[in-house]
Amino acid sequence: MAESLLILVTKPPYGFEEAFAGLRAGLGMLASGQVSVSNALLVGEGTLNAIAAQRPEAVRMPSNAEAVNDLLDFEARVYVVKEDLLDLVGDVPLLEGVELIDWEKARQVIDEHDMVTTF
């Protein structure tokens, strides 16, 4: 069995279910003891899940900000690729606790996990 899981989120927070499902899958695996480490890496449009100013009520969707915060509450690490975020929206406030990293560090994070799954 894998000890560590990395959820690679590539989809934006709203309009698709993949990002929410991925974040919740990581939380479920961690909370149930299926893995001892479950972290998330937000890349491409997935970086939008880390933006602090989300308004899910406007689109009547579950809050991906809450999903990110729930992972952080379980001491998971949530990484955001800085270059991707800046290309999409510039320098905007992020949810407290997420870690901005460059692509070089992102590759290291991927390599450090036993299992990686993409949403």
Image: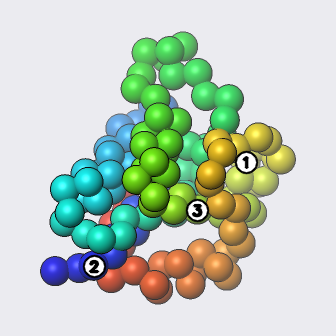
Task: Locate residue 89: give its quadrant.
Answer: top right
For label 1, the SS is helix
Disc 3/disc 2 C-alpha distance (Å) = 19 Å
* Residue matched to label 3: 79
Give the SS element for disc 2: loop
Q: Callout 1, which amino acid?
A: Leu
Q: Which residue is mark 1?
A: 88
Whole-percent x and y of residue 99?
Answer: 65, 60
Q: Which circle, 1 or 3, is nearer the viewer? A: 3
Left or right: where 91 falls relative to 39: right
- Mark 2–mark 1 Cα distance, whole angstroms, equals 33 Å
Q: Do labels 3 and 2 touch, CB within 8 Å?
A: no
Q: Which image quarter holds the N terminus?
A: bottom left
Distance, label 1 to label 3, CA atoms, is 16 Å
Q: Is residue 43 visible?
A: no
- Name the image quarter holding residue 92: top right
Category of crowding for the residue at label 3, using alpha-carbon neighbours closer than 10 angstroms: few (below 14), some (14–19), many (at least 20)? many
Q: Which mark is residue 51?
A: none
Q: Is residue 12 above or below residue 102?
A: above
Q: Amino acid at mark 2?
A: Glu
Depth check, front residue: 108 or 38: 38
- Report the number of discs: 3
Q: Residues within 10 Å of mark 2 (few under 14, many from 20)?
A: few
Q: Nearer the viewer, mark 3 or mark 2?
A: 2
The residue labelled by disc 2 is: 3
Query: What x and y, as percent, mark residue 90?
Result: 82, 47
Write the residue at 50% across / 42% down.
69
Q: Residue at x 33, y 82 (%)?
A: 114
Query: Vertically, is 115 above or below 72?
Result: below
